[in-house]
Image (tube, grey):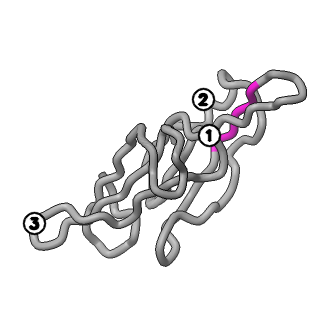
Amino acid sequence: MGDIDGDGSDDALVGVIKKTRFHREKARRIFLFKQVNGKPRPLWMGSKLGGVLQDFRYHNGRVVSLEAAPQPETGDTLFSVAEWRWKDFGLQFVRFRIHLTDKRNALQYLDP
């Protein structure tokens, strides 16, 4: 829960594993919901962020995501932690807290 769009009321940030209309493979995704007249209404049904979503947190008006980046040339997977903010109709990339490192190191940057 958190006020992702800055309107003064809490929104629900929900992690799901499913297909979407624009990305037909099952994957981890972030869906955002508003409360309108006491009922949940979709604010954003995120199909993708930058990389392969592993986990996320809400902190200080931003989504902080742990994302995987498979490296086909080596067979390794590197990880990044990114910050996203609400912009008009969706999440906009702000910055990397850490970029393309091992998972253990990246996890240190996921929580505030």
Q: Secondary structure at mark 2?
A: helix
Q: Which badge, 3 or 2, is on the more N-terminal residue?
A: 3
**Residue 70, how many percent across, how many down?**
74, 32
Distance, label 2 to label 1, CA atoms, is: 15 Å
In the drawing, does residue 63 fall left or right of residue 8? right
Camera-near label (3 vs 2) is 3
Q: How many marks?
A: 3
Furthest-right residue in this view: 73
Residue sitting nearer the eye, 28 or 80: 28
In the drawing, does residue 91 fall left or right of residue 61? right
Which residue does the numbered mark 1 point to in the structure image?
A: 52
Quarter holding residue 42: bottom left
Where does the magenta region start and end? 77-81
Q: Residue at 58% of width from left, 38% of height from top?
A: 66
Q: Residue at 27% of width from left, 61% of height from top?
A: 10
In the drawing, does residue 45 fall left or right of residue 76? left
Distance, label 3 to label 1, CA atoms, is: 33 Å
Task: Residue type at mark 2: give it.
Answer: Leu
> Residue 34 shows which numbered tag?
none
Which residue does the numbered mark 3 point to in the structure image?
A: 38
Task: Residue type at mark 3: give it.
Answer: Gly
Q: Secondary structure at mark 1?
A: strand
Dominant secondary structure of the residues highlighted in magenta in the image: strand
Task: Residue type at mark 1: give it.
Answer: Val
Q: Which badge, 3 or 1, is on the more N-terminal residue?
A: 3
Camera-near label (3 vs 1) is 1
